[in-house]
Image (cartoon, rainbow, N blue to C red):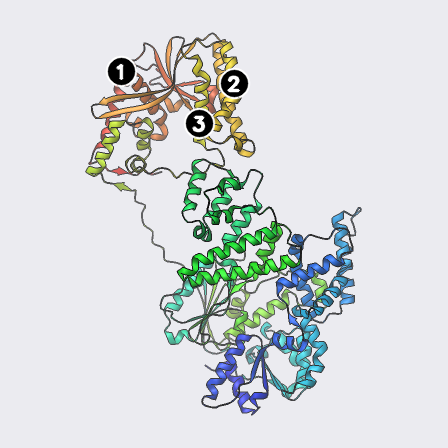
């Protein structure tokens, strides 16, 4: 395949131009490297000096005499100008400036690149901004500052440029405007032959520069455009080049060159468009396509990412057969996993309150890779302490006590909302991490760490020079802006193996096999989004580029990539469930509907193979070891809750009571349901305990009611954390617990007032009974009392229980259906334990007090509408209970999971 660069080189060598006096100007440095590589191949054994290759940006910088400043410095210097020349009372803070400073800088770039007359332009712009608020009767301070800003925009622009020029710096547009001003002097001093290659959409400054160069006979421009697009009067890919042809044709016809004489695009070739759900699905499909290519084919293959955020997923999806790879785009530093460490650290310090660090922020920091390196074993100890003590807020002094390591003190010392302190701690931590990683020779991790070191060192230098980064929120926001701009460059052979690049990196380069991803509207092309303060109508009036021009630029890049390719795979997201998804790019529709197409275009859908397997319920066969473990449990005593767990799901019983797998402990920042139940149970026990075996009177209950608030609070101190029940959901739950207790006591008071005699016999009574020589049953009864000489077995429930859940309908259902009969099963267990321990009283009832259904009162266990607990009832229950336990102990009955 003959590439555009090959064609330019052939033309150059035929023209016999002296290579040492020739300068080749290309859209990018990468294109220059490829140009020299291809030139070396064509010169073969010839010994000579190669021509100079530079990018258009380098040429402009050279002509302007200024140095392109970094985005970081440009933003800081712009804020310095704004603050110095602000005409109102209170200029915006640097934190607020970061929200719009980059946009304003982008507008300054556009204005200068297109050589706009700024005096009239800014007058027009400020008038438009003022007109937007013509209907405001009374100006607020915000609107007043807004109007002052736009009236002063011309002044900011001029002072900003003067300030940068004194420093010998400039932003890109400023360099372009300065280059146009210095162009004549530069041309007088330089006589080289100049070749402009592969340009398309030129800004006004570039047009003036190239136009002036073309007036000299030693300048030539090579257009990379297929004749098929030029001949089509409506094709958007040739929009800009046609304009330049009309504009320059008369003066510079002999300096124009079109290496391609016949179409390479509209020929027999295969173009396949594939719709795949989701972004990750696209890169997985790319890996599948690459797997089928030989090494020779991979050398002629490029993967072009329409969405550059897919780089990491793509690298993780490449087949192992790919040995040589070159990534031309940098890896954004914000996508490196270690960036989360600094984000978490900032969040920990910013969220710090008077009570200390929020536990979730602490745990988040502890889970970061750098924190694991720094803290080693201390990390697990701290995590366990937080969970066991249910610490919601942690004072720095609590963490960095006398036993804490230097690294722990480094991580958890307070930054006191000072950017200087923050940067000192961060840079010190980076040094500490380096000392850990360096002996391990973990070069990749050290490369990442060095990038963060450079970033924070730059922030420290700015902080030492300027006072704008005065608090943590501002520092964090500026750090995130810098992080989004920083990239880590990959090292690879740019001339061998698979090439992975973004759209702009593909300029001037040609490949036999092309794979392009993310061909969706809103991504490729990017659509109507434009980050600018300049209204659309004003852009049209001033001939500034809008989204229309951007779409045309995307169209040129897309069709240019396809020109010389022989096999093309175009991939888009066909899932319509999200933003910018589902709608394929207009470029695909253009390919599909071209009436003169000679290429083979086809569309298809792809999806990951899905194998549907029937859901199989887990089953664990019992072994002698398992039976032995269950027997030990039976000998110590089954509890009603353990047996209820088996009824609900035998596999859960196996995990919890055979294997001993406990529930994962976690910090309760919101009071859990079981904690609420414990508090209510313990409160009632302590309130009633002094009055055991005493007839309850109105006076006693009134006295108890006065103690409720203090007792509930005391229980929260014991079982939760009283400091954490003063606000939010926890305050609501605290009041719910208190109200549960008050409601129950008031219900009891009403019973006493109505003439009922109530005597509490036992509270939280523990029982253990022998069912057989090998099997025990044990449990705790919440309350035993006498109401009008009838013994009652009471179980408290903070959840809602209905009367129907305590009706015994069928004995088999009782030991098999948890949802319908679990409450009746538990109450019968308590009644059986009482009966075997103390004997069954003459008149006995059992049931539940449901705090969420308190109006129903005491919900009694019943069978056939009979609420009496009799020996016959308990004898029948004991038979079925033993049947259940024997099933658990039966080695031939596996633990089988129940369907949810």
Residue bearing mark 2: 707
In the displayed structure image, the side of residue 891 where residue 505 appears, left or right: right
Sooner in the amino-acid sequence: mark 2 or mark 3: 3
Dot 3 crowding, Cα within 10 Å, few <14, some 14–19, many 20+: some
Residue 289 place in picture, x, y as percent: 40, 67
Sooner in the amino-acid sequence: mark 1 or mark 2: 2
For the C terminus, the image quarter is top left
Residue 71 place in picture, x, y as percent: 62, 64
Q: Quadrant of residue 818?
A: top left
Residue occupying the far front of the picture = 402
Dot 1 crowding, Cα within 10 Å, few <14, some 14–19, many 20+: few
Residue bearing mark 1: 872
In the displayed structure image, the side of residue 117 where residue 362 appears, left or right: left
- Give me the disc on residue 677: 3
Q: Quadrant of residue 569?
A: bottom left
Sooner in the amino-acid sequence: mark 3 or mark 1: 3
Residue 194 place in picture, x, y as percent: 61, 84
Q: Are marks 3 and 1 in contact (CB under 8 Å)?
A: no
Number of numbered discs visible in the structure rendering: 3
Indicate the secondary structure of the residue bearing disc 1.
helix
Q: Residue at x 51, y 30 (%)?
A: 722
For the N terminus, the image quarter is bottom left
Q: CA distance from mark 2 to mark 3?
A: 19 Å
């Amino acid at each position: 395949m003959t590439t555009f660069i090959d064609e330019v080189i052939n033309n150059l060598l035929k023209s016999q131009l002296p290579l040492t006096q020739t300068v080749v100007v290309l859209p990018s440095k990468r294109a220059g490297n490829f140009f020299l590589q291809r030139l070396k191949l064509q010169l073969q054994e010839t010994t000579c000096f190669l021509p100079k290759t530079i990018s258009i940006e380098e040429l402009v910088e050279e002509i302007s005499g200024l140095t392109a400043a970094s985005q970081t410095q440009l933003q800081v210097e712009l804020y310095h100008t704004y603050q110095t020349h602000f005409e109102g009372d209170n200029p915006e803070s640097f934190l607020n400036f970061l929200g719009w400073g980059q946009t304003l800088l982008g507008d300054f770039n556009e204005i200068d690149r297109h050589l706009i007359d700024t005096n009239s332009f800014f007058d027009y712009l400020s008038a438009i901004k003022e007109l937007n608020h013509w209907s405001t009767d009374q100006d607020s301070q915000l609107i007043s500052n807004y109007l002052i800003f736009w009236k002063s925009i011309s002044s900011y622009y001029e002072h900003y440029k003067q300030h940068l020029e004194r420093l010998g710096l400039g932003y890109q547009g400023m360099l372009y405007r300065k280059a146009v001003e210095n162009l004549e002097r530069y041309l007088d001093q330089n006589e080289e032959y100049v070749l402009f290659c592969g340009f398309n959409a030129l800004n006004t400054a570039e047009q003036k520069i190239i136009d002036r160069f073309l007036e000299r006979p030693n300048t030539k421009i090579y257009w990379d455009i297929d004749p098929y697009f030029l001949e089509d009067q409506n094709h958007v890919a040739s929009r800009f080049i046609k304009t330049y042809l009309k504009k320059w044709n008369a003066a510079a016809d002999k300096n124009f060159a079109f290496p391609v004489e016949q179409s390479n695009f509209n020929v027999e070739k295969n173009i396949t468009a594939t719709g795949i759900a989701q972004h990750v699905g696209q890169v997985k499909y790319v890996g599948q396509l690459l797997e089928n290519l030989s090494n020779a084919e991979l050398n002629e293959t490029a993967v072009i990412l329409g969405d550059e955020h897919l780089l990491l997923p793509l690298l993780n999806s490449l087949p192992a057969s790919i040995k040589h790879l070159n990534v031309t785009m940098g890896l954004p530093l914000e996508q490196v996993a270690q960036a989360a460490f600094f984000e978490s650290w900032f969040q920990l310090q910013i969220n710090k309150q008077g009570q200390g660090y929020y536990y979730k922020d602490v745990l988040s920091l502890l889970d970061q890779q750098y924190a694991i390196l720094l803290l080693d074993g201390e990390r697990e100890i701290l995590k366990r302490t937080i969970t066991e003590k249910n610490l919601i807020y942690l004072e720095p002094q609590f963490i960095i006590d006398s036993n804490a390591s230097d690294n722990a003190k480094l991580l958890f010392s307070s930054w006191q909302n000072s950017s200087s302190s923050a940067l000192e701690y961060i840079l010190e931590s980076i040094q500490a991490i380096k000392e850990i990683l360096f002996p391990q020779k973990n070069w990749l991790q050290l490369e990442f760490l060095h990038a963060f070191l450079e970033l924070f060192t730059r922030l420290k230098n700015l902080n030492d020079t300027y006072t704008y980064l005065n608090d943590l929120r501002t520092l964090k926001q500026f750090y995130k802006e810098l992080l989004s701009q920083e990239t880590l460059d990959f090292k690879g052979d740019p001339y061998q193996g698979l090439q992975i690049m973004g759209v702009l990196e593909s300029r001037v380069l040609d490949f036999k096999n092309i794979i392009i991803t993310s061909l969706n509207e809103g991504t490729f092309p990017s659509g109507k989004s434009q980050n600018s303060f300049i209204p659309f109508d004003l852009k049209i009036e001033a001939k500034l580029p809008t989204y229309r021009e951007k779409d045309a630029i995307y169209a040129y890049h897309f069709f240019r990539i396809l020109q010389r390719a022989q096999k093309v795979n175009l991939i888009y997201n066909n899932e319509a469930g999200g933003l910018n998804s589902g709608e394929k790019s207009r470029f695909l529709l253009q390919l599909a509907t071209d009436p003169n197409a000679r290429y083979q275009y086809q569309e298809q859908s792809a999806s990951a193979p899905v194998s549907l397997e029937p859901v199989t319920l887990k089953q664990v066969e019992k072994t002698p070891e398992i039976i032995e473990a269950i027997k030990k449990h039976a000998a110590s005593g089954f509890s009603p809750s353990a047996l209820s767990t088996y009824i609900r799901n035998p596999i859960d019983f196996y995990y919890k009571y055979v294997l001993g797998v406990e529930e994962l402990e976690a910090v309760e920042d919101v009071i859990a349901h079981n904690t609420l139940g414990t508090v209510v149970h313990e409160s009632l026990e302590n309130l009633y305990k002094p009055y055991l075996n005493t007839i309850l009177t109105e006076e006693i209950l009134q006295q108890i009611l006065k103690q409720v608030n203090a007792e509930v609070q005391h229980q929260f101190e014991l079982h939760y954390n009283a400091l954490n029940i003063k606000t939010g959901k926890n305050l609501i739950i605290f009041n719910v617990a208190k109200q549960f207790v008050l409601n129950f006591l008031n219900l009891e008071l009403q019973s006493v007032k109505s003439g009922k005699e109530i005597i509490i016999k036992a509270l939280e009574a523990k029982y253990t009974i022998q069912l057989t020589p090998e099997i025990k049953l044990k449990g705790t009864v919440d309350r035993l009392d006498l109401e009008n000489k009838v013994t009652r077995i009471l179980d408290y429930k903070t959840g809602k229980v209905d009367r129907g859940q305590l009706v015994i309908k069928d004995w088999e259902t009782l030991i098999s259906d948890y949802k319908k009969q679990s409450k009746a099963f538990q109450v019968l267990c308590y009644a059986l334990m009482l009966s075997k321990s103390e004997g069954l009283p003459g008149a006995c009832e059992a049931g539940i007090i449901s705090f969420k259904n308190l109006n129903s009162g005491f919900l009694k266990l019943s069978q056939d509408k009979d609420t009496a607990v009799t020996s016959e009832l308990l004898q029948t229950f004991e038979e079925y209970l033993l049947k259940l336990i024997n099933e658990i102990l039966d080695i031939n009955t596996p633990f089988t999971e129940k369907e949810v």
